[in-house]
Image: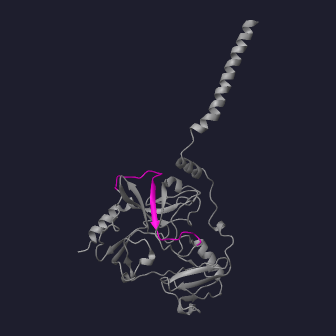
């Protein structure tokens, strides 16, 4: 009898030790194996469900809108919705084909041409000398919707101002004259692939304490996910604003993996190998409208390198929508070949 009780006691002791060990592992293991913030971002994004379609995000586009051409801002086309007081650029980075179609349906048929011109019968001057008003014609719905764009086509109108931090110090007739603009031959306006261009100046810039060159990334150097980089520009400081900042702004953004940014609830595979993304999934900092073409630079052993160029995104600092940049490392051969072929005599 005593031997039986001894065996049962030993079994009970072993069971108690086993249960205790299991509880310790259960409660202590999660604390000891918490993922890094970057890993957590990947898991959160890669395991998310499919995002709703873009059309579902536009349930209440107002039926009353107004168009105008702002002649004081390089003749840019602007649109105003009744629910908002601000005028927004039609070439707004957050503008989409679905939103454009919705607004055009609410306007009715606009007699605009497919090409760069606007039918003069649809343009009239309003009470302000600064704006030309586009008057919508309610003649039914068009089969095809064309979105006009206005471009500063004369090279003589382009100037490069270096070493400035404030727009108010810019003088229109100062700065380096642009002799040629070379866009990438494979650029796609549909998905912003190959979104880079080179400016050839008539005369070289003179380097000083405030003007210098940023280095291109090395071909064999790949900055790891989580690297902190800097983006700068004179874009909007708030998504609701329609005016650019007067003072140069900058922000620190971490590089994110392409796998994360191509996941279903971020950009659903929209990133190509010529793109990279950087920012925060909680939307704390981002580039915005007006920052396109701006630099994304990363510090590499004491040297600043141009890793990306601001390209596109969904809104400004929106959760789960970090900024997307042209990946400069993918264009090194094109940059070097173009610079060699089109160098100044």
Residue 231 falls inside the magenta stretch: yes
What residue is drawn where x is 35% and y is 60%? 216
Q: Foreground residue, 288 or 106? A: 288
Q: Foreground residue, 156 or 304? A: 304
Q: Is residue 331 left or right of residue 127?
A: left
Residue 277 falls inside the magenta stretch: no
Residue 127, position as x, y percentages in the image:
59, 93
Task: Find the residue positioned furthest to the left.
Answer: 345
Q: Foreground residue, 123 or 166? A: 166
Residue 194, position as x, y percentages in the image:
42, 66
Majority secondary structure of magenta residues: loop
Q: How many marks?
A: 0
Residue 30, position as x, y percentages in the image:
61, 38
Quarter of the image with the C terminus is bottom left
What residue is drawn where x is 54% and y is 48%? 37
| Region of the chain picked out in magenta, as a range | 218-240
Asked if residue 231 shows in the view, the reply is yes
Q: Is residue 232 left or right of residue 131?
A: left
Rendered image quadrant of residue 80: bottom right
Rendered image quadrant of residue 14: top right
Quarter of the image with the N terminus is top right
């Amino acid at each position: 009898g005593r031997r039986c009780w001894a065996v049962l006691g030993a079994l009970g002791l072993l069971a108690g030790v086993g249960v205790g060990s299991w509880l310790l592992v259960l409660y202590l293991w999660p604390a000891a194996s918490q993922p890094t913030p970057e890993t957590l971002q990947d898991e959160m994004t890669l395991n998310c469900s499919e995002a709703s379609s873009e059309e579902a995000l536009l349930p209440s586009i107002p039926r009353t809108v107004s168009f105008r051409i702002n002649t004081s801002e390089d003749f840019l086309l602007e649109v105003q919705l009744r629910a908002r007081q601000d005028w927004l650029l039609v070439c707004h980075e957050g503008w989409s084909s679905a939103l454009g179609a919705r607004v055009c349906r609410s306007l009715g048929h606009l007699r605009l041409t497919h090409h760069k011109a606007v039918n003069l019968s649809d343009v009239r001057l309003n009470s302000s000398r600064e704006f030309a008003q586009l008057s919508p014609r309610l003649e039914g719905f068009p089969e095809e919707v064309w979105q006009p764009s206005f471009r500063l086509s004369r090279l003589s109108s382009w100037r490069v101002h270096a070493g400035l931090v404030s727009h108010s110090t810019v003088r229109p007739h100062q700065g380096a004259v642009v002799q040629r603009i070379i866009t990438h031959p494979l650029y796609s306006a549909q998905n912003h692939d190959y979104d880079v261009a080179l400016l050839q100046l008539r005369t070289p810039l003179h380097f000083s304490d405030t003007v210098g060159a940023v280095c291109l990334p090395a071909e064999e150097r790949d900055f790891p996910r989580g690297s902190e980089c800097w983006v700068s520009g004179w874009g909007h400081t708030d998504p609701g604003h329609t005016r650019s900042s007067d003072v140069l702004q900058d922000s620190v953004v971490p590089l994110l993996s392409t796998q994360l940014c191509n996941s279903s609830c971020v950009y659903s595979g929209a990133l190509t190998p010529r793109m990279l993304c950087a920012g925060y999934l909680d939307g704390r900092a981002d580039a915005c409208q007006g920052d396109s073409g701006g630099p994304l630079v990363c510090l590499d052993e004491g040297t600043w390198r141009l890793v990306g160029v601001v390209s596109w995104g969904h809104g400004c600092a929106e959760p789960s929508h970090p900024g997307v940049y042209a990946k400069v490392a993918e264009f090194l051969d094109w940059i070097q070949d173009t610079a060699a072929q089109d160098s100044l005599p």
